[in-house]
Image: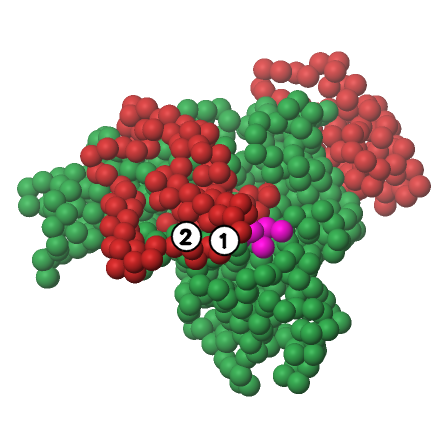
Amino acid sequence: MARPARADSEGMTLRARASRQQTGESFPEAVAQWRLTLRTEVKTTSSLPTSVFHARDATLEAMLAASTEAMLARLQTPSRAANPGAAAVAGQRLERIGVAELQALPLLLRAGGDRPPRIDDHARTEAIGVLADAALGADEAAAATAAELLQERFGIGAGGDRDADAAQLRQHLSAALPADAAGGPALAAIAHAVVDAVAARTAASPAPA
Amino acid sequence: MILGAAAQLRHEAVVAFAHAFVIAALNRQVHDRDSRWVADSLADVVTALRTAEAIGVDLPLMLQCSDDRLHHDGESLDGPSLQARSLLRRCAERGVAMLAFRRGLDAAEVNRLLDLLLLRRNVDALTRCNRDAALTALGIRNVDITLRSVGDPANRRAAIDPEARALHNYQELAEALQHNHGLALRDLELTIDETAAAIERTLADFDEPSHLLALATQDDVDRFTVGHSVRVALLALQVARRMGATRDQLVRVGSAALLHDIGKSKVPQDVLFKQGPLDAAERAAMMQHPRNGAAILLEQREGVDLAAVGAAFCHHMGPTGAGYPDAVAPVRPGGISRLVRVCDVFEALTSIRPYKRALTPIEAYAVMFRDIGEFDPSWLRAFVRTIGLFPDGTRVRLTDGALAVVRSQTTCPEQPIVQLLTGAGDATLAPGQPDHFTIGDTVDGDTLRIASIETQERCVEVPDLDVPPAPTAADACLPGFGPCGAPAHGG
């Protein structure tokens, strides 16, 4: 069964939208849209009842319906010979993948020799970096929480010696940098700014001894 | 089930109507009754009904409501049901068995119907003796409401059917996330504990992962990108479980993945769902969502796992911190963020978007390996080996012309176990003919491989994938990945 149409932000299905825009719709979609448009236009532009425009001959209508269904069914069956995916639907991008890229996948999966990933890898480094960013840049409530967490969980700003705290934080932050990058004065300045922010925001509630 | 083309179009029109109705109900629960978002979605319900009628759906269009799904003509509408949990719950509270929508329905009437179905004060309005009076009082003339019989066991499947339990779990995740997005939008306290509890309950049934992952392929209403986030969470849980994560770790992974896009609740919806390319200002607004997400989570009084804050902040960053947001302090993403990033990109590549078509998983992997620096390679490899180059359920054409479906994975991702649907050259399978075998095995002197992947809209040719003769030391060190050809552990 075909995937049901996805509704977009305006509630119109993507299929209907694609058809309305006349951009690369499939034949059955175009037929459905044509029928809808025709009936809508008849209703809005003619005072005659819609039934006037229906086929009068029930046998003819049944034959037409049967032959159309058969045609649509054939069109909906993917061809094994062709690769319809190679032709992107107009208006909808389709990433091009080279044969060589697919062929390389099994070897790529075995390359690297990396150790198995772990859930808690770099967790501390990530947390300190994200909290430092929030302490400096987030809105009031988030910045205050970030400052508290830096102090409570990582001891930043808990010692009372801002230079020592900044040096400690700089060491933590430098773990996020590539091995050959020291961080330099810029990192030191960031560490000082974070320690100052933590001190300012936690002044009213000093950390427990 | 195989439908004729015309019947398929009618079915899609019914699904589109059900989607529109679910979206309208979701909008009513998040936005003001008379807001623009509600008005737009109500108009969409009316449009969808008219479209359905024009395509040939018989009116009144009937939606049956069980406790866990919407149905039409006895057929389950799984996609629209995925995010319909709160609507269905309210229908159940009111004893609603079926809604029948007639020609003449207008947007205001749909809104009044939602008053009846959603507002707490109307919970008793639909008793048998009150129903007609309630419908008259609210001016609902074009919707018939059928009530359940006394003792109707509408949810009897849930207790016994893994598929029904999987749907229930998916709905619960979606509802928890939907609720939190709505709270974040209004600067209210999130219900983080409920989210973690929903993950816990999902894990209880996670021994049936195929049912959950099958639901992850359903098109649902992507309100606030909820469907995307639920799918990312399910993928992340699969991989983390395969990598030996403890139960506590799984709850943390699931919660972080589910909430990774919470910052999008602060992105204007005009930008979030824009059909065309974003301009510079819109792009800047969109690129704020990781920082916004971290801030939203930090503001929760209850406190939130720092891994979830990290994943919200870092899920658009590569392993070195490159990407966005442009952090003030150096940031190196942690393990959970790296996993969420892989799942996030994979889900995006394999989903339909207004501007792009869906890639098959193997194509998505090729794109991701093309940009390997964007990902932690160890997490990317673990992901591919867990989900498979040809995930379970993929329909494939073999080199002898037979059609088959992938049933399970082995330790070699390019060699899944398949079940034949037809014989060589598309011939009918002979009775008693073995129908399960591993790709790469020799059958009647032929070594069969996968020639193409057949999706509903595309046929993707698969080249001959070289099969290395023996696993490397790297294979051996990944938990659950043994020598080539063995069934995958837990897969």
Expressed as whole percent of the image width and height from the top left, the position of residue A195 reads 82, 29
Q: Secondary structure at mark 1?
A: loop
The segment highlighted magenta reads B43-48
Picture coordinates of residue B160, whole percent (x, y): 43, 73
Tag 1 subunit: A
Q: Give the crowd class for mark 2: few <14, some 14-19, many >=20 residues within 10 Å.
A: few
Q: Report whether mark 2 lies on the same chain as mark 1.
A: yes
Residue B403: percent from the left, percent from the top? 20, 47
Residue at 69%, 74% in the rendered image: B136
In the visual, does B240 lie left or right of B294?
left
Q: Is residue B297 magenta?
A: no
Residue type (three-letter) at the residue carrying disc 2: Phe
User: Quick check: can you spot residue B477?
Assistant: no
| Residue A9 percent across, percent down from the top left | 59, 43
Q: Residues within 10 Å of mark 1 (few under 14, many from 20)?
A: few
Above or below for B249 versus B412: below
The amino acid sitting under disc 1 is: Leu
- For label 1, the residue is A48
The chain displayed red equals A
Place residue B72 in its image quadrant.
bottom left
Return the chain for callout 2.
A
Camera-side residue: B317 or A193?
B317
What separation in Å lies between label 2 and label 1 (alpha carbons)?
Answer: 9 Å
Which residue carries the number 2 mark? A53
- Depicted A28 relative to depicted A104: above or below: below
The relative height of residue B68 versus residue B403 in the rendered view (above or below) is below
Seen at 56% across and 51% down, the residue is: B47
Q: Which chain is green?
A: B
Helix, strand or loop under label 2: helix
Relative placement, left or right, of B331 versus A205 is left
Task: Tell me whether the residue at label 2 lies in contact with that at label 1, contact meaning CB atoms closer than 8 angstroms.
Answer: yes
